[in-house]
Amino acid sequence: MWVGVDCGTQSTKVVILDPDSGRIVAQGQRSHALQEGANGRREQDPLDWVAALEGAFDEALTTSRLDPRRIEAIGVSGQQHGMVVLDEAGVPLYPAKLWCDTETREHNAALIEALGGEAGCLEALGLVLQTGYTASKLAWMREQHPERYQRIASILLPHDYLNFWLTGEHVAEYGDASGTGYFDTRRRCWHQDVFAQIAPELDARRVLPRLIESHEPAGHIRPEIAARFGLRPDVAVSSGGGDNMMSAIGTGNIAPGRVTLSMGTSGTVCAWSAQYPEGCDPQVAAFSASDGGWLPLVCTMNVTSATTRVREMFGFDIDTFSAQVASAPPGAEGVQILPFFNGERVPMLPRAQASFHGLDSRNTTPANLCRATMEGASYGLRYALECMGPLGSAARQIRLVGGGAKSPLWRQMLADILDLEVVCPQVTEAAALGAAIQAGWCLRQRDAQGEGPRSETLKALCDRLVALDLTTHTQPQPEGVAAYRKGYADYRALLASEHGIPTGG
């Protein structure tokens, strides 16, 4: 049995995969609190992640009555970009600042300027720094909490921290490391000169974790953790990765032409590439994948978070909200929204606010406002796909995950807006499944060393273990494609008039 752990913003999930049958035989989940503050502060206590992992793992084992000694490997997926700083004893010095924290936007702007603007960032790092990345969080801590900053002995990402708790090892893999802002995504190494500009008093060789390949285990489980869950002492903990990298594996997105699109609180669009992706918009994060390739990615901040805001404003439950959307025509009778309730990452508008447009005495109805919000969030995802240039143009199928993917109405809307077929995987917890598959891959790579050809590649594992839910397969409809072609043009015109974003693309 292989275990996948997904530590997200709202909860930690655990799945146990039987690799012979391809079935998820056990699941568990525990929530953890988000600490929100003024000026865009979004933080969590790393110890809450540990407690949630323990609770979710206990639930999975208890409800399934599975013998824990059958477990061979564990893989961890974590929310990207979060900053976990530890002292010499391995104790967190400060709550983890998360991917959605925008308190450090001025620090990010200063770092971009120090590196020579977009061109300098691309030259040094292979991507342009974003406010959500770890780099600006570290610069913020240096300024705001100098005493704690001086005590930093280790800087980890959320999944690195859980790997540390499981194994005692300070390691990182290329995929998640790509989102720190001090990792060279072309050469796949820490960029020590960039790190020195961010944190000149800290020694990168001492505080940054050792980098490992995606197929390498992070280590073996610590004896006390094995005893806690009744596991064998030789259980391998894989390299793991960021949630987007693990979702790509969990949706089988490790080959050209496929795109994984996550419709959660935020939205992510990622495509796979065998080489460093050239020809993309600078807003595309040219991350490494957690399978040896690259995973160029675009993140938008407002998807189900936007629809939830409007739904709750009217006091609708999810079914009523969906009925309201369905009752309004495509285009919402001219009502449009720029749904930037949380600012926006792509396009890079961290200070932006949401705004409705085209309202008059005839079309200002709950149904139109609800539909316009769903459409506006979807237009943002099309914008993201277009930013990928040739990789976006080569897309043949969208694999959907996340809460929004459960809606047949939203799936059809997205198929029409993108003019592409969409389909959901059978296992909706794609990041946790991807972590479990990667754990098995790492285990088999380790066991095959020195024994001739490796028994099963990651692609073969994905082909065998990632199944699609054909009941969700949705083709674009000509009428919808035509209606949304105009709607998207109007959306781009709004971006231009309100925020100066060029209409081309």
Image (cartoon, helix red, strand yellow):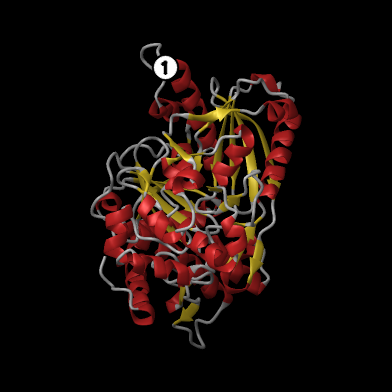
Quadrant of the rendered structure where residue 367 is?
Answer: bottom right
Element type at mark 1: loop
Q: Which is nearer the eye, 210 or 392?
A: 210
Callout count: 1
Toward the bottom, the furthest residue is 361
Quadrant of the rendered structure where residue 455 is?
Answer: top left
Q: x and y percent of residue 179 in the render?
A: 44, 52
Q: Using the image, determine if residue 127 lies above or below residue 19.
A: below
Q: In this view, does 364 lie to the left or right of 93?
A: left
Q: Which is nearer the eye, 500 or 409?
A: 500
Q: Using the image, determine if residue 22 lies above or below residue 422.
A: above
- Give me the residue at 31% from left, 45% from top: 396
- Give me the residue at 40% from left, 13% from top: 450
Q: Which is nearer the eye, 402 or 294?
A: 294
Q: Is residue 163 left or right of residue 441?
A: right
- Give me the residue at 72% from left, 44% from top: 51
Q: x and y percent of residue 258 in the render?
A: 35, 43
Q: x and y percent of residue 464 in the render?
A: 45, 26
Q: Which is nearer the eye, 202 or 445?
A: 202
Amino acid at the residue labelled 1? Gln
- Provide the residue designation for mark 1: 449
Circle 1: is it few (<14), some (14-19), or many (20+) Cα within 10 Å? few
Q: Can residue 415 be seen in this view?
A: no
Image quarter (top left, top right, bottom left or bottom right) of the N terminus: top right
- Give me the residue at 67% from left, 40% from top: 53
Q: Is residue 383 left or right of residue 20?
A: left
Image quarter (top left, top right, bottom left or bottom right) of the C terminus: bottom left
